[in-house]
Image (spheres, rainbow, N blue to C red):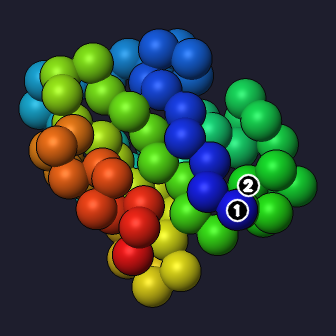
Amino acid sequence: MVIVSSIEEMEYAGSLNESSTTLLSNLLDDFIFHFGVDFFSSASTIIILSQDNFFHVIKAPSGLQIPYEPIINLSKFIET
């Protein structure tokens, strides 16, 4: 299952000097806090939409997390 959420829905407020690693870790923690570990565990892929025309992948079948991917690549990412 692919889950798509938004930063606004999770009420996430990052900082200007936040590293990509910290961002992804904080998004993952916030997702689990807002939706629960069972919902997190049931997904194969979790994508967080950003208000800046980017998306972040906090969970993927490959195990790789991806920060700041341009929104134009979202459909290609979901198809793979």
Q: Residue at x 56, y 63 (%)?
A: 45
10 Å neighbourhood of mark 1: few (<14), some, or many (≥20)? few
Quadrant holding the C terminus: bottom left
Residue 59 higher or lower than 75, as above or below: below
Tag shown at residue 48: none
Tag shown at residue 1: 1
Q: Earlier in the sequence, mark 1 or mark 2?
A: 1
**Amino acid of disc 1:** Met
Residue 50 higher or lower than 44, as above or below: above
Label 1 with label 2: CB-CB less than 8 Å: no
**Amino acid of disc 2:** Phe
Residue 28: image location, x then y, percent: 54, 49
Task: Name the secondary structure under disc 1.
Answer: loop
Q: Residue at x 47, y 81 (%)?
A: 63
Q: Camera-side residue: 27 or 8?
A: 8
Q: Which residue is mark 2?
A: 40
Residue 50 higher or lower than 77, as above or below: above
Q: Is residue 19 visible?
A: no
Residue 37: image location, x then y, percent: 81, 53
Q: Residue furthest right?
A: 38
